[in-house]
């Protein structure tokens, strides 16, 4: 938990010696609280004060990295209970469990499909993160499947086996990819701690009760194992929400470091809808990693879209650069459509213009990321602003006609806009969905 | 270990929809929503007396813009609102219906208030589930048809909407006179939601008869805005602000089925409706108006598992 300037002041020598470069200890404390200066500037800080300060600067929920390179997943380091308080920082990893009793060709086929699960949405790439291999048979089969999976996917790995020998063998093959090891429990703690330490791989710790979980992470910490992900096992959905909420509250509000780790949730439901709704619940409610089995593109796309929504920054709507965007093989006869620079609006319009197959120009006006109606109400999408944008982007030089299409919702500004811009205003549809039909019937 | 338990000051108000014979209506049961004493599904912290409820959406005219996927289920009854309503109840086990009087809109048939009131009266005879009645979205027309429908259902304790900030008086007066509940719609804005609740209750309608429509966007289409507005309003309610302590109604079906995803494939639309509803339930939705019968069935299963009922 971050300390206030006054909290820090109490830890300082209060001699106002000025050796730190500040006039008083209080002034120095205030700068420390803002993280504007290093505590090393004070030569008289006690060891205890140093430790307290160092701890207070650690994040309440540790950031854990799984995997390497381009497909590295980082989860944790969350700072709030609700996204409106600031934002959620690290979107939960979504992964798929592959059972090692499937035959090789089925596994390969599955991986091929999973590797294809990438979507573009409002200018961002949405992708899945993890493949978890779960042991059902003997050690050899597990290791064999780990090898097969590693060869066939670039995604980060989770090794799910309670068999220490199997884990050791598997880590010889894929240890360099920094897989997540599932899992240490009360019964195997010492062995799995050693494994995580020797191989420098992150480790899942599981216990049904938060009390025990907390004890286990403390013990692991004492053995210098700190790259942890925590898990409270299989439970009914409301109990899981309770665990996730309590872990987040305890870490943030009570500075309980022993629970300050990202949480793994395994959704083990056979019904595909139960699976998807449960996964959606945990994505919304504080999970750090969600593992599922179903790989159908419709479900995964919905889950990744939800993750994008929940983890978007509420203070900063996604925006695109305001400019003129040619869509398709434009000519000087192509229509010119005006919209905002709110990503959701722009990409929705873009998709419909593309679908219409009518090459067009889209002029994205700087509305500071507001949508059409909001921007209009806030006077960020006015005849003046639109005129400025059209002039600034030299739209006149691109086309030989004089018509400007505006969103149907701002039809009221037509007259004013015509007067200010000198363009002839054509009122387009209210909803982007109407664009294809509109463009096909538009004669310039 | 000491858990972190919130000591909330206040609960969400309980709104009762429908009236049985004993209560002066003709419904065979009532539906209650709200009453939460904590955030969604944190049972150890406070009581959650009523599960979220899904309403089936039924129109008074054949919808021109519904997905073809939905045709498969309602195509045979689109032209007969009474048969449509009956199908939802009998075949799909609808617990509550939401009738949208779209046909009254000047652009969609311009039905008169007499016609709509007559339809609603017939509907009361055809089905015995509680009703939600929605206008057509044209303010001046709604100010004619909704009072007529309110009167035609006097004593049935329907939920009628939507009242908006610059058009709430006519509807509030009717709802007050005829013993119904009201939907107060605000454009993704906690302050307007609060303001409108105050305006309506100032006219004499108790806060316990208001349901908030926070105006939602579908998954991928601004869902997160409503999600956070609902969380903020609910936190304020639990912390003691009586004026936003109303249950939420979310029009999930209409938003999910107009997305590009739903237009691309029926299966994608179904999932889109389900996940939109799931996220909103986690933000505190009490009443969700949906379209696809399979999506509704799946959501009812989800709600049961949330409430701890084994399937």
Image (cartoon, coloured by chain):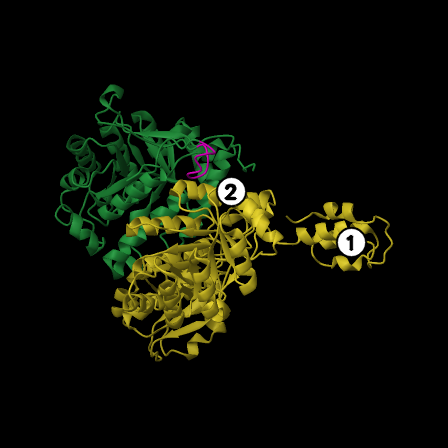
Chain letter belonging to callout 1: A
Horizontal side, residue B257 vs residue A412: left or right: left
Q: Quadrant of residue A104?
A: bottom left
What's the magenta region? B37-46
Horizontal side, residue A382 vs residue A407: left or right: right
- Where disc 1 sits, the SS reads helix
Along the line of sight, which residue is nearer the eye, B288 or A322? B288
Of the chain colours in the picture, the one used for chain A is yellow
Chain painted in green in the figure? B
Along the line of sight, which residue is nearer the eye, A405 or B236? B236
Q: Report the residue at 25% width, 36% height from top.
A: B96
Q: Give above or below for A150 relative to A411.
A: below
User: Which numbered mark, 2 or 1, is in the foreground of this view?
Assistant: 2
Tell me the residue that label 2 is attached to: A210
Chain letter belonging to callout 2: A
Tell me the residue that label 1 is attached to: A28
Of callouts 2 and 1, which one flags the residue occurring earlier in the amino acid sequence?
1
The label shown at residue B87 is: none
């Amino acid at each position: 938990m971050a300390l206030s300037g006054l909290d820090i002041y109490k830890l300082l020598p209060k001699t106002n010696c000025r050796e730190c470069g500040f006039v008083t200890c209080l002034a120095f404390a205030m700068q420390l609280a803002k993280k504007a200066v290093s505590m090393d500037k004070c030569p008289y800080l006690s060891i205890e004060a140093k430790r307290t300060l160092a701890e207070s600067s650690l994040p309440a929920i540790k950031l854990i990295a799984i995997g390497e390179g381009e497909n590295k997943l980082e989860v944790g380091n969350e700072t709030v209970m609700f996204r409106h308080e600031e934002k959620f920082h690290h979107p939960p990893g979504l992964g798929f469990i592959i059972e090692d009793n499937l035959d090789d060709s089925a596994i390969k086929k599955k991986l091929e499909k999973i590797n294809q699960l990438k979507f573009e949405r409002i200018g961002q790439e949405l992708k899945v993160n993890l493949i978890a291999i779960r042991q059902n048979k003997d050690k050899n089969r597990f290791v064999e499947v780990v090898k097969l999976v590693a060869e066939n996917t670039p995604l980060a790995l989770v090794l799910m086996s309670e068999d220490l020998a199997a884990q050791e063998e598997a880590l010889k093959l894929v240890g360099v990819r920094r897989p997540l090891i599932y899992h240490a429990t009360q019964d195997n703690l010492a062995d799995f701690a050693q494994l995580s330490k020797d191989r420098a791989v992150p480790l899942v710790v599981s216990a049904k009760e938060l009390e025990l979980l907390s004890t286990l992470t403390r013990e692991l910490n004492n053995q210098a194992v700190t790259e942890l992900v925590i898990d409270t096992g299989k439970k009914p959905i409301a109990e899981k929400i309770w665990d996730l909420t309590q872990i987040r509250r305890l870490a943030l509000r009570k500075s309980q470091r022993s629970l300050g780790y990202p949480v793994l949730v395994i959704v083990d439901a056979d019904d595909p809808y139960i699976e998807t709704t449960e996964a959606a619940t945990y994505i919304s409610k504080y999970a750090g990693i969600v593992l599922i089995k179903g790989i159908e593109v419709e479900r995964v796309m919905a889950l990744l879209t939800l993750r994008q929504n929940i983890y978007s920054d509420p203070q900063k709507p996604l925006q695109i650069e305001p400019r003129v965007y040619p869509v398709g093989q434009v000519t000087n006869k192509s229509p010119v459509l005006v919209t905002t620079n709110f990503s959701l609006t722009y990409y929705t319009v873009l998709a419909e213009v593309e679908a219409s197959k009518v090459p067009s120009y889209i002029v994205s006006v700087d509305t500071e990321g507001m949508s059409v109606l909001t921007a209009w109400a806030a006077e960020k999408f006015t005849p003046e602003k639109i005129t400025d944008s059209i002039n600034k982007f030299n739209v006149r030089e691109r086309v030989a006609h004089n018509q400007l299409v505006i969103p149907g919702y701002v039809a009221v500004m037509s007259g004013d806009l015509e007067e200010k811009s000198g363009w002839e205003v054509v009122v387009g549809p209210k909803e982007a969905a109407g664009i294809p039909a509109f463009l096909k019937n538009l004669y310039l | 270990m000491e858990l972190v338990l919130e000591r909330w000051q206040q609960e969400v108000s309980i709104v009762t929809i429908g009236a049985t014979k004993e209560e002066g209506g003709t419904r065979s049961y009532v539906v209650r929503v709200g009453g939460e004493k904590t955030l969604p599904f944190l049972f150890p912290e406070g009581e959650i007396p009523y599960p979220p409820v899904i309403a089936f959406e039924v129109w008074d005219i054949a919808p021109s813009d519904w997905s073809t996927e939905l045709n498969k289920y309602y195509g045979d009854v689109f032209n007969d609102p009474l048969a449509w309503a009956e199908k939802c109840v009998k075949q799909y086990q609808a617990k509550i219906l939401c009738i949208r009087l779209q046909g009254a809109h000047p652009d969609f048939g311009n039905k008169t208030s007499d016609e709509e009131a007559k339809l609603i009266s017939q509907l009361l005879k055809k089905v015995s589930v509680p009703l939600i009645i929605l206008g057509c979205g044209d303010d001046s027309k709604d100010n004619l048809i909704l009072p007529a429908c309110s009167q035609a259902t006097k004593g049935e304790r329907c939920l009628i909407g939507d009242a908006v900030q610059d058009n709430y008086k006519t509807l509030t007066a009717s709802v007050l006179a005829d013993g119904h509940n009201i939907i107060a719609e605000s454009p993704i804005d906690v302050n307007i939601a609060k303001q409108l609740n105050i305006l309506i209750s100032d006219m004499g309608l108790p806060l316990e008869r208001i349901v908030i429509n926070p105006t939602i966007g579908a998954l991928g289409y601004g869902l997160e805005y409503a999600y956070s507005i609902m969380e903020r309003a609910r936190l304020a309610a639990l912390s003691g602000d009586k004026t936003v302590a109303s249950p939420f109604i979310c029009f999930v079906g209409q938003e999910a089925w107009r997305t590009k995803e739903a237009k691309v494939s029926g299966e994608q639309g179904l999932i889109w409706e389900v996940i939109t509803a799931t996220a909103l339930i986690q933000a505190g939705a009490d009443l969700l108006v949906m379209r696809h019968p399979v999506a509704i069935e799946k959501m009812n299963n989800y709600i049961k598992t949330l409430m701890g009922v084994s399937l």
